[in-house]
Amino acid sequence: MQNIFIALNARSQWEEITRSFKFSDDIRHESTIDNLKWFLTVGKKSNARRKGCKQAVELAELIIEINSNYEKSKSNNLQ
């Protein structure tokens, strides 16, 4: 349960940091898992010089890792 709060806190921080970042027109500025993955593969390049980009990358990676661990545990509980 603690990881949920860590992920939610990281999500709030990520949204605050990336508020002024450039995002593709087809990718809205939201912190969904798909948008975070897009940010790590595409978006961080166009925002690399913006203040907080390194921290935004770290937060996105943390959120994705927590989500991945949650999905694995959920899958294991179904078996």
Image: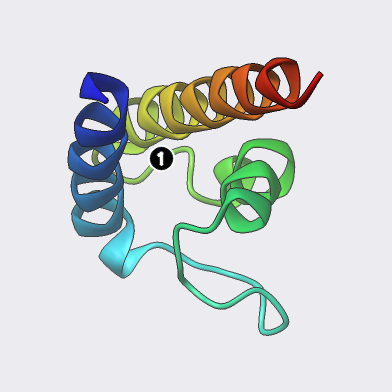
* Residue 36 rendering spot, x and y as whole percentages: 57, 47
Which residue appears at 28% of the width and 57% of the height?
A: 15
Left or right: 53 with respect to 66? left
Left or right: 37 with respect to 55? right
Q: Nearer the viewer, residue 71 or 66?
A: 71
As drawn, 70 above or below 37: above
Q: Residues within 10 Å of mark 1 (few under 14, many from 20)?
A: few
Q: Exactly how many numbered labels are in the figure?
A: 1
Type of amino acid at the residue the image marks with label 1 = Arg
Mark 1 lies on a secondary structure that is loop
Which residue appears at 36% of the width and 36% of the height?
A: 56
Which residue appears at 30% of the width and 23% of the height?
A: 3
* Residue 14 rendering spot, x and y as whole percentages: 30, 46
* Residue 57 rendering spot, x and y as whole percentages: 45, 30
Q: Which residue is mark 1?
A: 49
Q: Nearer the viewer, residue 49 or 54?
A: 54
Residue 74 occupies which quadrant of the picture?
top right
Residue 37 occupies which quadrant of the picture?
top right
As drawn, 63 above or below 42: above
* Residue 66 rendering spot, x and y as whole percentages: 47, 23
